[in-house]
């Protein structure tokens, strides 16, 4: 097995962009990484990729794609929504000698099961499978996508039907900080709890916006996520999401204000029951609650919902 892949001489990224007329579309929030040293550093954060299977989301003109190929992967499937990139991605696929294939599709519709072999499956309690998700997507796509993938982590579906598939993704720097923020951190918020109850989250480093063409107004945070063998809260994703969303609905107030909206008006008895059962001070600020606190609140709410038919469907406003 080769440690690295040498690609045949290729046009530079600038030449590819000029040759194929690939100006970044502002309306699609496209901006491209052009420096292969930067994309090599980014790809290294995924760990050792030699002989691995990788799905790259939103390759654009292909800077990250080149770095992934050079890391000596066994199989790379790139998923790009914008058809303008078809020819330039096919050129890279040809240069890769069968290692890479390009699928022109929205990642939200992409069926992983159809593109990766069953043999890479690893039991959830086993080591992570040799499959990595890597991508520098527009921020307005990566933020909803990570919530969709966290739900898939919880249900072991999509890319996580192969096991604890690791993810290396970029976000707006502040979102990256939120995803990794521990209790008490000023950025602690809904994404922190949702990501950390299911994954170990590492905010690796930031890429200055100036490294992209055209330059976005904000810096880019690189985040690596590894699904946990045991979720910290072993309850359905939708229930956890509802509780966490409600608690952070009133971020600056005491956490009891957020828990209150899980129940119809006038059911202070149920609100009090949550705090009694969970043994949490109701005047704690949401950002100070630990994962164990969230676990206790979620379980207390779950038990009440089991007792009172229809309560789970109650939504504030
Ligand atoms: N990864 C390239 C880079 O770093 O230079 C391009 C980055 S650009 C910010 C994001 C890319 O994701 C664009 O090529 C865009 O067309 C693609 N994209 C956006 N939404 C997508 C989606 N839902 N599915 C697949 N690709 C998408």
Image: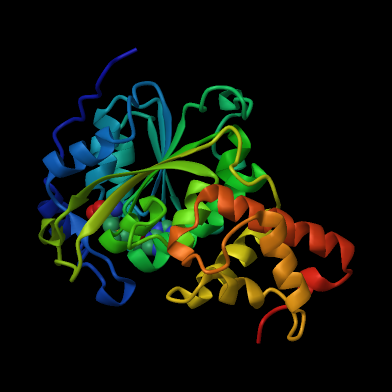
Q: Position of residue 235 (x, y in %)?
A: 70, 50
Q: Position of residue 40 (x, y in %)?
A: 19, 37
The C terminus, quarter of image: bottom right
Q: Position of residue 45 (x, y in %)?
A: 28, 36
Q: Residue at x 29, y 32 (%)?
A: 69
Q: Residue at x 58, y 32 (%)?
A: 229
Quadrant housing residue 294: bottom right
Quadrant housing residue 109: bottom right
Residue 11 visible (yes or no): no
The reply, left or right, for residue 173 in relation to residue 86 is left
Give the color scheme: rainbow, by chain, secondary structure or one colour: rainbow
Ligand 1 sits in which quadrant?
bottom left
Image height of 80 relative to 120, above or below: below
Q: Residue at x 20, y 67 (%)?
A: 218
Residue toward you, 207 or 59: 207
User: Residue placed farthest to the top in the image?
Assistant: 1
Residue 299 visible (yes or no): yes
Image height of 202 relative to 124, above or below: below
Q: Residue at x 64, y 42 (%)?
A: 156
Q: Position of residue 309 (x, y in %)?
A: 89, 69
The reply, left or right, for residue 47 in relation to residue 40 is right
The reply, left or right, for residue 300 in relation to residue 306 is left
Count how many numbered circles sit on residues in the image. 0
The reply, left or right, for residue 150 in relation to residue 311 is left
Residue toward you, 158 or 104: 158
The N terminus, quarter of image: top left
């Amino acid at each position: 097995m080769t440690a690295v892949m040498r690609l045949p001489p290729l046009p530079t990224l600038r030449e590819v962009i000029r040759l194929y007329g690939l100006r970044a579309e502002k309306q699609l929030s496209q901006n491209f990484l052009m420096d292969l040293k930067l994309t090599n550093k980014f790809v290294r954060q995924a760990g050792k990729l030699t002989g691995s299977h990788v799905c790259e989301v939103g390759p654009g003109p292909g800077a990250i794609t080149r770095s992934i190929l050079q890391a000596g992967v066994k199989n790379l499937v790139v998923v790009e929504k914008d058809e303008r990139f078809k020819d330039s991605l096919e050129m890279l696929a040809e240069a890769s000698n069968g290692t890479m294939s390009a699928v022109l599709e929205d990642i939200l519709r992409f069926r992983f099961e159809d593109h990766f072999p069953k043999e890479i499956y690893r039991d959830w309690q086993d080591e992570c499978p040799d499959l990595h998700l890597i991508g520098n997507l527009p921020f307005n796509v990566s933020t909803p996508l990570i919530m969709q993938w966290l739900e898939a982590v919880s249900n072991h579906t999509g890319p996580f039907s192969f096991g604890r598939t690791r993810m290396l993704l970029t976000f707006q720097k502040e979102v990256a900080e939120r995803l990794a923020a521990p209790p008490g951190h000023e950025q602690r918020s809904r994404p922190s709890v949702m990501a950390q109850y299911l994954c170990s989250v590492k905010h690796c480093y930031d890429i200055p916006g100036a490294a992209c063409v055209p330059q976005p107004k904000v810096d880019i945070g690189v985040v690596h996520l590894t699904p946990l063998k045991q979720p910290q809260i072993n309850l359905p994703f939708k229930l956890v999401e509802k509780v966490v969303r409600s608690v952070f609905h009133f971020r600056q107030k005491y956490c009891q204000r957020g828990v209150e909206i899980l129940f119809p008006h006038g059911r202070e008895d149920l609100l009090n029951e949550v705090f009694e059962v969970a043994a949490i001070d109701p005047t704690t600020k949401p950002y100070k609650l630990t994962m164990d606190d969230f676990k206790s609140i979620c379980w207390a709410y779950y038990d009440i919902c089991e007792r009172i038919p229809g309560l789970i469907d109650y939504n504030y406003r």
